[in-house]
Image: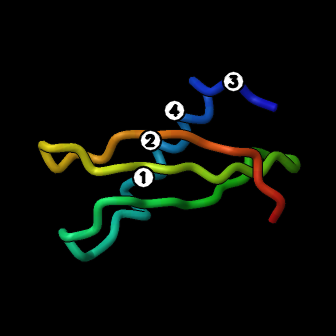
């Protein structure tokens, strides 16, 4: 398992590729893998300034 700071850093880097097309969306989740086999599901929420903020993660089975 990786540290939350490392997972957040990777997720923040990947975030632009997962942004929803609809500006009304307020929550976002996506999965990614850190090789060789560490899978994570991350969550973001849109704040009052319409910026996506990392809100958590969990280890995922994909």
Judging by the rendered image, the residue that carries numbered circle 3 is 3
Question: Which numbered circle lies on residue 12?
Answer: 2
Q: Residue at x 57, y 49 (%)?
A: 42
33 or 30: which is nearer to us? 30
Label 4 to label 1: alpha-carbon separation = 10 Å
Q: Residue at x 44, y 41 (%)?
A: 12
Closer to the camera: disc 4 or disc 3?
3
Q: Position of residue 58 (x, y in %)?
A: 69, 45
Closer to the camera: disc 3 or disc 1?
3
Residue at disc 3, secondary structure: loop
Label 3 to label 1: alpha-carbon separation = 18 Å
- Location of the N terminus (image quadrant): top right
Q: Residue at x 20, y 70 (%)?
A: 24
37 sits to left or right of 2:
right
Judging by the rendered image, the residue that carries numbered circle 1 is 15
Residue at disc 1, secondary structure: helix
- Location of the C terminus (image quadrant): bottom right
Label 4 with label 2: CB-CB less than 8 Å:
yes
Task: Tell which circle, 4 or 3, labels the residue nearer the N-terminal end.
Answer: 3
Task: Tell which circle, 3 or 1, labels the residue nearer the N-terminal end.
Answer: 3
Residue at disc 2, secondary structure: helix
Label 2 to label 3: alpha-carbon separation = 14 Å
Judging by the rendered image, the residue that carries numbered circle 4 is 9
53 or 7: which is nearer to us? 53
43 sits to left or right of 27:
right
Label 2 with label 1: CB-CB less than 8 Å:
yes
26 or 19: which is nearer to us? 26
Query: Which colour style is shown?
Result: rainbow
């Amino acid at each position: 398992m990786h540290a939350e700071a490392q997972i957040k850093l990777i997720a923040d880097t990947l975030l632009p590729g997962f942004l929803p097309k609809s500006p009304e969306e307020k929550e976002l989740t996506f999965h990614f893998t850190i090789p060789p086999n560490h899978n994570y599901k991350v969550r973001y929420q849109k704040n009052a300034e319409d910026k996506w903020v990392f809100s958590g993660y969990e280890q995922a089975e994909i």
